[in-house]
Image (cartoon, grey):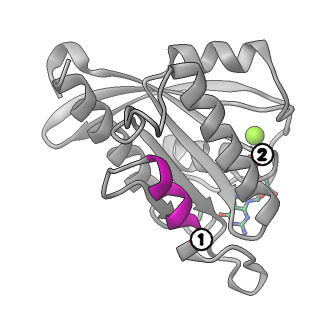
Amino acid sequence: GYAFHNSYRIVMIGAGGVGKSSLTVRFVVGRFVEKYDPTIEDAYRIQMSIDGEVANLDIVDTAGPEEYSALRDQYIKLAAGFIVVYSVTSAHSCQAAAKLRDVILKIKGLSVEDGSCYDYPIILVGNKCDLASERTVTFEEGQAIANRCSHFTKNFFEVSARTDTNVSEIFCEMVRQIDTVEWRK
Ligand code: GDP
Ligand code: MG
């Protein structure tokens, strides 16, 4: 991206227990930590080199109730891109992810009707893909939900914070999508 676009505000959002904190810490610290306080909301700043440019990522790891929260709305207003997380072991969390994505689009003033949502940086992520025997959401189901509101080729990833599968990929792709949007301004 451009030098003046080198700051990227990214919000991790999703139901409790899907692995938002685990993914964030896996990416920022490079480790898998077994337990986090599910109520703790934290922000991380990490500098990374991507496509030959330095990018400063401000990552907010949200926590707490799924229902309306003024704080959550504030994060959504300020963010440039969203990583919406569910667990492939929880169909409920997948539905929650789809609903949260709709909340984001609404707050950002984007819609399917006028097509304004399709090139907005929202990446849907199915975490815990290492738990193959506990899977209740298929890859195809996740991809279909992502395709409903995004035309980015890489709008969906299955990942594992535990085995470090596709974790850095989601953050790199997020930066690229934000750049794509900024370019057009
Ligand atoms: P959050 O509430 O969304 O922040 O979820 P956490 O990051 O606190 O994770 C919830 C639980 O899921 C913890 O017990 C984690 O160890 C576990 N967990 C997170 N990511 C993975 C993963 O990729 N694979 C497995 N097997 N467990 C995970
Ligand atoms: Mg957490």
User: Which picture quadrant has residue 14?
Assistant: top right
Q: Nearer the viewer, residue 14 or 130?
A: 14
List the residue tagged with mark 1.
141
Count up the numbered dots. Answer: 2
List the residue tagged with mark 2.
15
User: Which picture quadrant has residue 20?
Assistant: top right
For the C terminus, give its image quadrant: top left
Q: Is residue 65 above or below residue 143?
A: above
Cβ at disc 2 under 8 Å from ligand 1: yes
Q: Is 98 placed left or right of 77 in the picture?
A: right
Residue found at x 62% / y 37%: 102
**Is residue 19 visible to the viewer in this orientation of the structure?**
yes
Q: Which of 180 and 3 is in front in this view?
A: 180
Where's residue 161, x and y in %?
Answer: 60, 59
Amino acid at the residue labelled 1: Glu
Magenta stretch, main secondary structure class: helix
The Cα atoms of the two marked residues, 2 and 1, are separated by 17 Å
Does residue 50 show up magenta in the picture?
no
Residue found at x 55% / y 56%: 125
Indicate the secondary structure of the residue bearing disc 2.
loop
Q: Is 37 placed left or right of 162 in the picture?
A: right
Q: In this view, does 78 lie above or below 168?
A: above
Q: Quadrant of ligand 2?
A: top right
Q: Is 153 placed left or right of 80 in the picture?
A: left
Indicate the secondary structure of the residue bearing disc 1.
helix
Where's residue 178, x and y in %?
Answer: 32, 32
Residue found at x 68% / y 83%: 132
**Callout 1 crowding tier (Cα within 10 Å): few <14, some 14–19, many ≥20:** few
User: Which picture quadrant has residue 163?
Assistant: bottom right
Part of the protein shown in magenta: 141-149
